[in-house]
């Protein structure tokens, strides 16, 4: 089996993405997570270019890695000085990494226009920098910046830049599609030309995603013999991003039979992807291949019926191989198979001919047409399932609520008060509470009336609250009369759950979601007590 090394540049190239900001401690935590995944090279940043990267290399010296080689990144030395006197190269050596990666110009346009030097002087910068570093560290990797654009414009000079770095001692030559504009067919043709000119060179690929083919270009380079691929977790990077290692790695391992981090480590791909997203404070991309939450999610009834017989019918790999899982969604496109799968997932065994299935399917389609979205509110679906099974939950009965909002010019915030009347175990509870807005006031008033009977409600915490205006359901009176869907995520010491409400009135939609959240908590407490008593 061929083996290809994985070079991660999330901490440097990935950190250049819009909206992505990493502290020194963020970078250290991500570096260890990448090491756990089995990444071979971790590019920590550009020493001396900014305080965060400088601090990272200062602090990381006290850390050890089991799998990865930490790498410092920089450029060839400045044209007006020598390698020995160049501050950039000095900062790279001061990082004390065993591997250094430097980039140089391989596009003649960049040499003459961006640097303003002769083509020969540019080759001297490459030779001097690689040679100087090669004498002082274990390994020097040369990134041929803008290589494919350079080869297209002046192939002889682009090859000269590679040969110069190779003869100066570079261990590997990385062909960079820096602008991300090269299509896969041209990538292949160019790599073949490089291999013909430099048959003994170890090649790598560094692709950007501006044409949405960074992963494809990386796979093509590896197919043709490249021995290293560079990229980032989740494809983060400047402009449209870099080659996404969360797609490159499983494609190599599972589709092309090429060893990278080892199949046993593939299960860590999804946790690593989500960990980096969380540290970067970015929401994970649901539809990301392999590691997205929607990657193995099925909504159409025909699809679900098929995967229940054999998952290969609509899944290209087993989701567990990359740490993911199969999911079945509930919607107006659902069939009986969706209901059966979801019920079984929640612990309820229903027969295909059970009338409950027809009842649920009919109600599900009706509710979805009104704007309900049960694929994202499992708790509300389970309550609907219990009702269809003839097991309605009657912990309390709603009578009335009344909400008042008022604000005077001199008040910094509106004043909100809610009154709730419910029947609990044969008693009428009439309570009132103030809150930070109408939903908070309603929630507090309802709990006030219930906690005397159900004290464990005090454990419940509101974790998230989302409101979405539903398009296509607008009254003639204008957009402010649209249906709204409210999602509430709640949690206690045992678990998290999501409930939902839909109405023209945002208070009513919120009330539905709050009532479901509290009812679900009481139900799950009963289930836990029942299990303990057995």
Image (cartoon, helix red, strand yellow):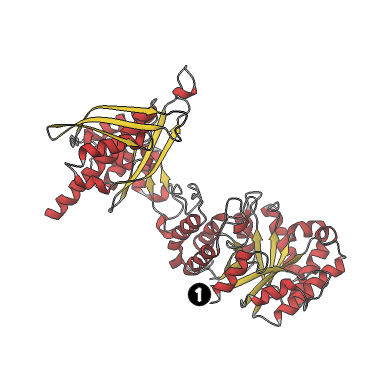
The one of 385 and 132 positioned closer to us in this rendering:
132
Residue occupying the far top of the picture: 476
Q: Which residue is mark 1?
A: 65
In the image, is 134 to the left or to the right of 517? right
Task: Choose between 90 and 322: the one closer to the eye.
Answer: 90
Kindly indicate the quadrant of the structure image that contains residue 133.
Answer: bottom right
Assign the C terminus to one quadrant of the image.
Answer: bottom left
Q: Is residue 276 above or below residue 297?
A: below
Q: Where's residue 388, x and y in %?
A: 22, 34
Where does residue 527 sit, x and y in percent of width and height?
19, 48
Is 176 located above or below residue 68 in the figure?
above
Q: Is residue 1 left or right of residue 161?
A: left
Q: Is 129 left or right of 70, judged from the image as shown?
A: right
Direction bottom: furthest residue: 135
Q: Residue at x 22, y 34 (%)?
A: 387
Residue 14 lies in what quarter of the image? bottom right
The structure residue drawn at horizontal position 35% and vertical position 27%, both measured from the top left corner, is 404
Which residue lies most toward the front here?
410
Where's residue 228, x and y in %? 61, 68
Is residue 71 visible to us here?
yes
Viewer-closest of 202 and 405: 405
* Res 3 visible: no
Query: Image check: 441 left or right of 103?
Result: left
Kindly state the secondary structure of the residue where label 1 is placed: loop
x then y, percent, for residue 251: 53, 59
The vertical placement of 407 against 349, above or below, is above
Image height check: is 138 above or below 304? below
For the point 46% across and 52% down, which residue is it?
316
Numbered disc total: 1
Question: What residue appears at the point 48 percent right and 66 percent down from the top-left corner?
Answer: 33
């Amino acid at each position: 089996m061929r083996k290809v090394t994985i070079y991660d540049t999330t901490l440097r190239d990935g950190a250049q993405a819009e909206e992505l900001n990493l502290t020194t401690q963020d970078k250290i935590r991500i570096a260890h997570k990448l090491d756990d995944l089995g990444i071979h090279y971790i590019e920590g940043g550009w020493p001396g270019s900014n305080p965060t990267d400088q601090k990272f290399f200062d602090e990381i010296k006290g850390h050890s890695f089991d799998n990865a080689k930490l790498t410092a990144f920089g450029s060839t030395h400045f044209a007006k000085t020598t390698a020995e006197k160049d501050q950039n190269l000095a900062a790279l050596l001061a990082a004390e990494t065993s591997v250094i990666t430097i980039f140089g110009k391989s596009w003649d346009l960049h040499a003459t226009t961006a640097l303003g030097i002769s083509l020969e002087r540019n080759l001297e910068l490459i030779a001097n920098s690689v040679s100087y570093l090669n004498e002082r560290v274990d390994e020097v990797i040369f990134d041929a910046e803008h290589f494919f654009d350079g080869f297209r414009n002046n192939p002889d000079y682009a090859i000269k830049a590679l040969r110069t770095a190779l003869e100066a001692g570079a261990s590997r030559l990385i062909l960079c599609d820096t602008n991300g504009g090269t299509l896969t067919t041209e990538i292949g043709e160019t790599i073949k030309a490089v291999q013909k000119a430099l048959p003994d060179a170890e090649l790598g690929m560094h692709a950007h995603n501006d044409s949405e083919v960074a992963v494809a270009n990386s796979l093509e380079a590896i197919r043709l013999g490249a021995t290293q691929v560079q990229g980032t977790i989740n494809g983060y990077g400047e402009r449209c991003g870099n080659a996404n290692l969360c797609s490159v790695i499983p494609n190599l391992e599972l589709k092309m039979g090429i060893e990278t981090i080892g199949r046993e480590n593939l299960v860590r791909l999804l946790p690593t992807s989500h960990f980096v997203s969380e540290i970067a404070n970015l929401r994970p991309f649901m539809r990301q291949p392999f590691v997205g939450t929607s990657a193995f999610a099925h909504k159409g009834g025909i699809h679900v019926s098929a995967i229940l017989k054999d998952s290969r019918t609509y899944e290209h790999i087993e989701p567990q191989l990359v740490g993911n899982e199969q999911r079945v969604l509930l919607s107006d496109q659902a069939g009986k198979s969706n209901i059966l799968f979801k019920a079984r997932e929640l612990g309820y065994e229903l027969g295909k001919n059970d009338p409950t299935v027809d009842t649920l399917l009919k109600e599900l389609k009706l509710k979805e047409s009104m704007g309900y979205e049960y694929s994202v509110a499992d708790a509300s679906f389970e309550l609907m399932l219990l009702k269809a099974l003839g097991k309605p939950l009657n912990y309390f009965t709603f009578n009335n609520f009344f909400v008042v909002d008022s604000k005077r010019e001199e008040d910094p915030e509106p004043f909100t008060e809610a009154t709730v009347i419910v029947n609990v175990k044969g008693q009428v509870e009439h309570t009132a509470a103030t809150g930070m807005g109408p939903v908070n006031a309603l929630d507090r008033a309802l709990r006030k009336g219930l906690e005397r009977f159900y004290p464990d409600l005090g454990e419940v915490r509101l974790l998230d609250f989302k409101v979405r205006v539903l398009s296509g359901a607008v009254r003639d009176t204008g957009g402010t009369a649209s249906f709204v869907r409210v999602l509430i995520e709640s949690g206690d010491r045992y678990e998290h759950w999501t409930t939902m409400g839909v109405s023209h009135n945002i208070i009513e939609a919120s009330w539905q979601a709050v009532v479901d959240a509290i009812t679900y908590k009481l139900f799950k407490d009963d289930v836990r007590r029942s299990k303990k008593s057995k």
